[in-house]
């Protein structure tokens, strides 16, 4: 079955710096890769996603890149702010899997003022 | 719209007790999911329901049962709770119209369960 590895598990940056979180997946049939943000004590919420027919997608300060050949995708946050502090989860959906997502184990991002 | 709601928010059980976690969504989504979240483990799928009347096992189904009561409601039952089931449980829903759709999953606020 699908396996998603996420690195690093913790990341600390200074406000204004960039942050990059990387994920690899094992199933070449995966075709959808969302990223969720979870603030402390809250529910996960989608922040950006990418489909397998696209190499990069950007939304203001966040971007996601996908390398299908290497089977990895990354989240990039520029000009980080303290409110970006949260746990970020990557996920992958296998083609034909009824929407089921396999999640990475999460990255705790801390942005220091 | 309330989105996805879950009850209860917190629960403490003794080993061997049973309980049902309730989930409801008002977005007319056809797919619903139950996850558990443990420290350092991410979100793991317990069961899902692709549409009303169907349920299937996810990654970690042992010790759980589910019921898709109608299109809105999807419940998770622990028949005989064990300390290993101490976790935060999230329900989610999405609009999946076929095998090729890629739609956002909306999560409920979670239920924090402790089994002593």
Image: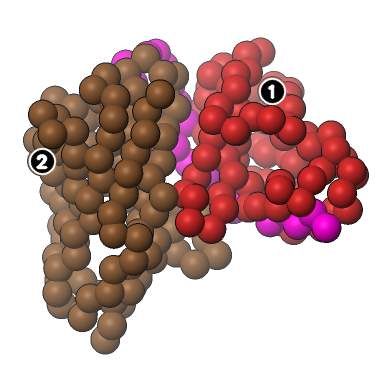
Chain colours: A brown, B red
Q: Position of residue A37 (x, y in %)?
A: 38, 56
Q: Nearer the viewer, residue A67 or A64?
A: A67
Q: Secondary structure at mark 2?
A: strand
Percent position of residue A11, x then y: 29, 68
Q: Quadrant location of the N terminus of chain B?
A: top right
Taking the spot 10% from the left edge, 41% from the top edge, the residue there is A56
Residue at x 75% of width, y 41% of height: B21
Give the camera-side residue of B69 and A21: A21
Mark 1 chain: B
Q: In the rendered view, would you say A20 is above or below A14?
A: above
Q: Which residues are magenta?
A: B94-116
Q: Which residue is mark 2?
A: A56
Q: Neighbour class for label 2 at 10 Å: few (<14), some, many (≥20)?
A: some
Disc 1 is placed on an element classified as strand
Residue at horizontal 79 percent and vertical 45 percent from the top: B82
Magenta stretch: dominant secondary structure? loop
């Amino acid at each position: 079955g699908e396996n998603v590895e996420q690195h690093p598990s913790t990341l600390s940056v200074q406000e204004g710096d960039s942050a990059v979180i990387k994920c690899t997946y094992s199933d070449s049939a995966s075709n959808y890769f969302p990223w969720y943000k979870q603030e402390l004590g809250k529910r996960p919420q989608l922040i950006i996603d990418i489909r397998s027919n696209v190499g990069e997608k950007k939304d203001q300060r966040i971007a996601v890149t996908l390398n299908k050949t290497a089977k990895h995708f990354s989240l990039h946050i520029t000009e980080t702010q303290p409110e970006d502090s949260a746990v970020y989860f990557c996920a992958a959906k296998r083609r034909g899997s009824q929407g089921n997502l396999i999640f990475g184990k999460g990255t705790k991002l801390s942005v220091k003022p | 719209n309330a989105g996805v709601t879950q009850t209860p928010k917190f629960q403490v059980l003794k080993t061997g007790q049973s309980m049902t976690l309730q989930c409801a969504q008002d977005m007319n989504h056809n797919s619903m999911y139950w996850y558990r979240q443990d420290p350092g483990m991410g979100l793991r799928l317990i069961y899902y329901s692709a549409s009303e009347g169907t349920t299937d096992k996810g990654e970690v189904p042992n010790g759980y049962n589910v019921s898709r009561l109608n299109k809105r409601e999807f419940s998770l039952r622990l028949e005989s709770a064990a300390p290993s089931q101490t976790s935060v449980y999230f329900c989610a829903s999405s609009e999946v119209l076929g095998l090729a759709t890629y739609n956002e999953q909306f999560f409920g606020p979670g239920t924090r369960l402790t089994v002593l």
